[in-house]
Image (cartoon, rainbow, N blue to C red):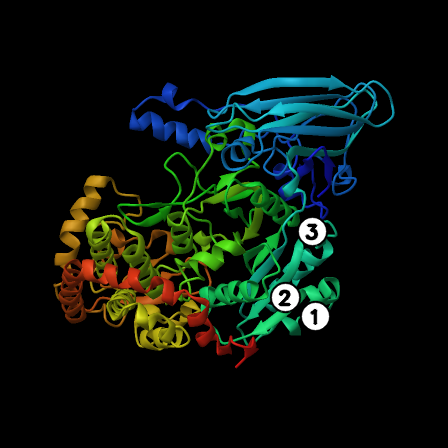
Amino acid sequence: MNTTVSMGVVRRTLQRQVFPLDRDTDVFPLYVDPDPAILDADKYEVGSSQAAKDLNRAALRQSIASGDTIHPEQIVSRTALQMGPSEKLSFGTYFNAFPASYWRRWTVVTAVTLDVQVRGAGSTVTVYKSMANGRSQRVDSIVVAGTESETASFELTLKPFVDGGWYWYDVVAGEDGAVVEQAEWSAEVAADKAEHGTVDICITTMNRPDFCAKLLTQLSDDEVLAPYLDEVLVMEQGTDKVADSEVFPGAQAGLGDKLRVIEQANLGGSGGYARGQFESLRKGTATYAMMMDDDVVCEPEGIIRAITFGDLCKRPTLVGGHMFSLYARARLHSFGEVIQPYRFWWMSPSYAINDWDFGARNLRSARWLHQRTDVDFNGWFMCLIPRSVIAEIGLSLPLFIKWDDSEYGLRAKAAGYPTVTFPGAAVWHVPWSDKNDALDWQAYFHQRNRFVAALLHSSYPKGGRMIMESFNHQLSHLVSMQYSTVELRHMALEDVFAGPEQLHADLPTKLGDVRAFVKPFSDAQLKVEREEFPPVRRHKPPKKKDDFEVPGRKAQLVAAATSPLRQFRKLRPMAPDYPEIELTAMDARWYRLARYDSAVVSMPDGTSAALYRRDPERYRDLVRRTVAMHNRLRKEWPSLAERYRAHLAEVTSPEAWARTFGIDDTDGADG
């Protein structure tokens, strides 16, 4: 972005106004907003009543959109928008508002200048700011006098944004319409901040050639992004290769010698990202390495903003982006994530609302979006890491998938390097809610890696609630007839006991071992067609109608007490041969599954189903082993934690990873 040097200081562009060139109407609410602000109730007005809180939270989910929208032809260019006569639009949106509180908290910037270039006599530009509680205040305004293009400049301090708040501008067109030609937020900083950093974008891919090639095209097509790219590293771990995509040649031509495809064995996300970190560190020419998934749609401007923000942070900082849904593109998955210390589980802060639809309620109408959200980590679907931090704290843990990004955020935080999930930097990704990773082979990695991360970073003796919660989860899977998941979680804990020395050795083979292990289990055998399962039959009709309502807390507690005991009963006569019911993924909760001796259960992605069968003998064995395993965890936690922490630096070192990659790092050659 542009810089201007004067008298030892630098004027540097922080953010520019942008619009989607593909003119996808689904994403318009993220760039420009025709609706008014209708602010929700303050939490102190709502009070402490749980019923009132629930009602207010439900009200927040209700759409307040007027139905007005801009038309695709109004987008003149990447930075310009045409407005009709007397039309009013707000640029207080996800991609075009200025996240002032983040700049105030984390960077050296103390004041910003907003320059808005408008053509259209009689048009008005008005600047607003918000407080941390969402209340907006008018700051300043100007009226365009002539018919020629004019630039309105506003000097804006960042002092009032300690706890939260944004700046933005609204434009009202004159009688003959207007064109908002461009807008930029800039700041004066020290002269040593004149040059922007560069980035190695590290993309791990496996058997998504077209998706990955299209992402490379998005990176190559943006001329403004090009100077920021040091190299784009694609870690190819599949058999269906990105280079074979018909889209790839165009992307390759656009990126030229900045593109490097590295083929290696399937080492999972952590192995792919670690290779990117390793290569970036070994090359030593980029300021940052950015982790990015292969199955995302990217807003290239977000990469520039993340780099600019990182350049101006007070200390080296990990800068993450947000995730929007690939299927509902105005819906934000999460506004930031933390690790709840006592549970040691990732979650959003209590005030945040996940799966937020900007198309239904705009930024200016939601109080919670104006409070600055501080995080512990950012997912590696888009996360910028300073190379200096990688050099100091090491590479990713060899975990294959799950918890590698969150562990790294905690490790960086312990070393004094925060993570900021930065508004205005984002990708579109398949939402996690559409996946089945708590039940399939990924359950192994969830369990093992969560315990590894907790042993490394939990500040509570024996991990706080972790062991009890793991035991409870095992029981819920047991009464749900999900025996393969229980066995995988047992395998995971056995591998936790094996210690950190085994992590690198297991990395290339563990996925195959896990998948082979669960093959014999009925609940792990997914079938596409319903006709592949026997029909639903029962020896006797049920005494009462199947209830699919959500039970209250008391009913769930009763079910939790009685369901484990019911599993010791004999099977009903026809249950071994015929399912007693068909359940959709949304209704297949433990308290419902526990009533049946067999069931056909569909998967969350809607593509397949599995047959669950109750097995009292297997249940007894698994309960016994579950109790023994968790008692052992309680006993050995202190020594295990000491062991993992002692080996962390070695396990995450470039030297250890070089051996796993088969690289002779003494001469930089692949082995």
Percent position of residue 427, x then y: 57, 50
Q: CA distance from mark 3 to mark 2?
A: 22 Å
* Three-letter residue code for mark 1: Glu
**Which residue is located at x 67 percent, y 28 percent?**
113
Q: Quadrant of residue 486?
A: bottom left
Check residue 645 in the rendering and tell me which mark sits there, or answer none.
none
Front-most of residues 211 and 192: 192
Percent position of residue 140, x then y: 66, 18
Check residue 246 in the rendering and tell me which mark sits there, or answer none.
1
In the image, is residue 538 above or below residue 330? below
**Badge 2 vs badge 1, beta-carbon distance below 8 Å:** yes
On the rendered structure, is 354 left or right of 118? left
* Three-letter residue code for mark 3: Leu
Check residue 225 in the rendering and tell me which mark sits there, or answer none.
3
- Residue at label 2? 210
Q: Quadrant of the N terminus?
A: top right
Q: CA distance from mark 3 to mark 1?
A: 24 Å
- Work out whether mark 2 precedes mark 1 in sequence or the reverse, and give the earlier one: 2
In the image, is residue 73 above or below residue 283? above
